[in-house]
Image (cartoon, rainbow, N blue to C red):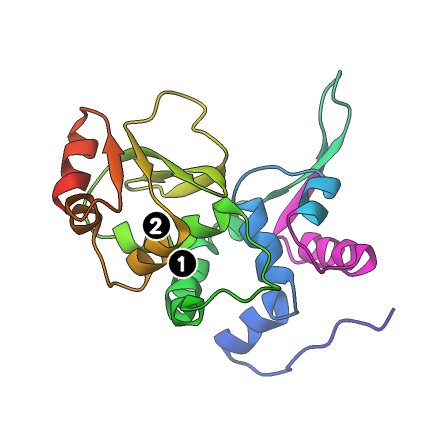
Amino acid sequence: MSPRRSYDQYCAAARALDAVGDRWTLLVVRELLVGPRRYTDLHADLPGVSTDVLASRLKDMEQQGLTTRRRLPPPAAAYVYELTERGRALLPVLEALAGWGAHGLAQRRPTDAVRAHWFALPLLRSLAGTGLEGVVEVRLDEGHFHVRLGDTESYGDGPAPDEPDARVALDAGTCVALSRGELTVGQGVREGRIEVAGDSVLAKALRET
């Protein structure tokens, strides 16, 4: 395997790209922002990546201090990969990148893979700066994910582990419209494109955004 290349430039952007600029690296970060993942789970949610490339990226990311690998206690006894604090600090980078790339979601290609939690990044970005706090469970035709709003933003695959403050149901096209700034949650509710369930302060605020 060829040694890792560097831009050899005394520049913060170049140094960042030395660490995360390889193909697949930021998508691995996207998956690990969900939480600790087994290698097989990562491979399943990164369609198109070869096992050799994924193993190489994970090794490089561990060397860069972005990830760690640990063994789960019995009865699982499996190894999982998870982000370090430095790796988790890439969340706003991915949010910005998702916002910048949202225009590319205008049309879904027949060959495009999709996972429900891939919509978490643009949804987090669309709700950023609203001052809302709490856990929102989101249901799409493709599945469920949940997001945590507030000072510490995060997201996870599947239903919320505890009772969420609000439940939101919408389709992928509406989620794309939210990420592109073409629609607010409140507008989607009034137009019948979004359902918000719950009586919490967060649920009521979402209906009015």
Q: Position of residue 143 (x, y in %)?
A: 49, 38
Q: Residue furthest left?
A: 208
| Residue with the mark numbered 1 | 95
Q: Which residue is drawn at the image coordinates 49% and 74% (left, top)?
A: 12
Residue 65 highlighted magenta (yes or no)? yes
Relative placement, left or right, of 15 versus 40 is left
Say if mark 2 contacts mark 1, CB within 8 Å. Answer: yes
| Magenta-highlighted residues | 45-69
Q: Which residue is drawn at the image coordinates 45% and 42% (left, top)?
A: 141
What kind of residue is marked 2?
A: Leu
Q: Which mark is residue 175?
A: none
Q: Position of residue 204 (x, y in %)?
A: 14, 33
> Dot 2, crowdedness within 10 Å: few (<14), some or many (≥20)?
many
What kind of residue is marked 1?
A: Glu
Disc 1, SS: helix
Q: Which residue is drawn at the image coordinates 55% and 53% (left, top)?
A: 114
Query: Residue 162 falls in which quadrant of the image?
Result: top left
Q: Which residue is drawn at the image coordinates 71% and 26% (left, top)?
A: 72
Relative placement, left or right, of 132 versus 51 is left
Q: Nearer the viewer, residue 206 or 20?
A: 206
Relative placement, left or right, of 188 versus 42 is left
Disc 2, SS: helix
Total marks placed = 2
Q: Position of residue 25 (x, y in %)?
A: 63, 61
Quarter of the image where the N terminus is located: bottom right
Residue 177 highlighted magenta (yes or no)? no
| Residue with the mark numbered 2 | 124
